Image: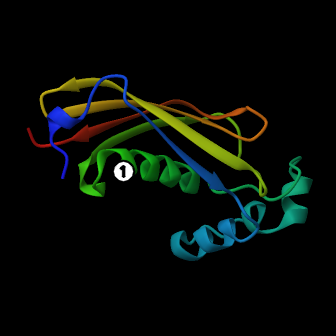
């Protein structure tokens, strides 16, 4: 397991996720969020989107997954901050690119950007705080 000395300012990480046709349905099953805009193409289109849209909390879970992969343990993720700036539409591929911006004792601070395949930001100001042992 990594210790605080294994994390360096400037380290970077990346995670790519695809919002396939079934992702909103799977997420609805575990979260209980069966809002039709998430699981019905026609409802998404009626709301002005090209298709159904992914639940925002699923996008945030992907952010947590990216940070967990870098930190090495889900128990190390202590805080996530995010502003949803654009819905993720079924068919979108989202790339999370993060970097370590500070290591202060056992606290590791991360900044993450998330963009779809068109280069559009889907999250703004995403950051995380991890706690690692020295």
Which residue sits at x=55%, y=40%?
96
Asked if residue 56 can be seen in this view, the reply is: no
* Label 1 neighbour load within 10 Å: few <14, some 14-19, many 20+: some
Q: Position of residue 66 (x, y in %)?
A: 45, 47
Which residue sits at x=90%, y=64%?
42
**71 shown above or below 51:** above
- Quick check: 116 left or right of 123? right
Which residue sits at x=52%, y=52%?
62
- Quick check: 43 left or right of 133? right
Q: Position of residue 126 (x, y in %)?
A: 48, 33
Farthest left residue? Answer: 134
Task: Indicate the quadrant where residue 13 lies.
Answer: top left
Which residue sits at x=85%, y=57%?
51
**Residue of label 1:** 68
Q: Position of residue 17 (x, y in %)?
A: 61, 54
- Quick check: 24 left or right of 75? right
Q: Position of residue 1 (x, y in %)?
A: 18, 53
């Amino acid at each position: 397991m990594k210790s605080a000395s294994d994390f360096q300012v400037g380290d970077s990480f990346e995670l790519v996720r695809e919002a396939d046709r079934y992702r909103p349905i799977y997420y609805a099953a575990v979260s209980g969020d069966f809002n039709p805009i998430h699981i019905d193409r026609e409802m998404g289109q009626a709301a002005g989107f090209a298709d159904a849209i992914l639940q925002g909390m699923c996008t945030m879970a992907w952010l947590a997954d990216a940070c967990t992969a870098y930190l090495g343990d889900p128990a190390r993720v202590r805080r996530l901050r995010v502003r949803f700036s654009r819905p993720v539409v079924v068919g979108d591929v989202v790339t999370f690119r993060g970097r370590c911006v500070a290591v202060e004792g056992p606290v590791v601070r991360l900044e993450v950007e998330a963009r779809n395949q068109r280069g559009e930001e889907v999250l703004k100001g995403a950051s995380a705080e991890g706690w690692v042992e020295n």
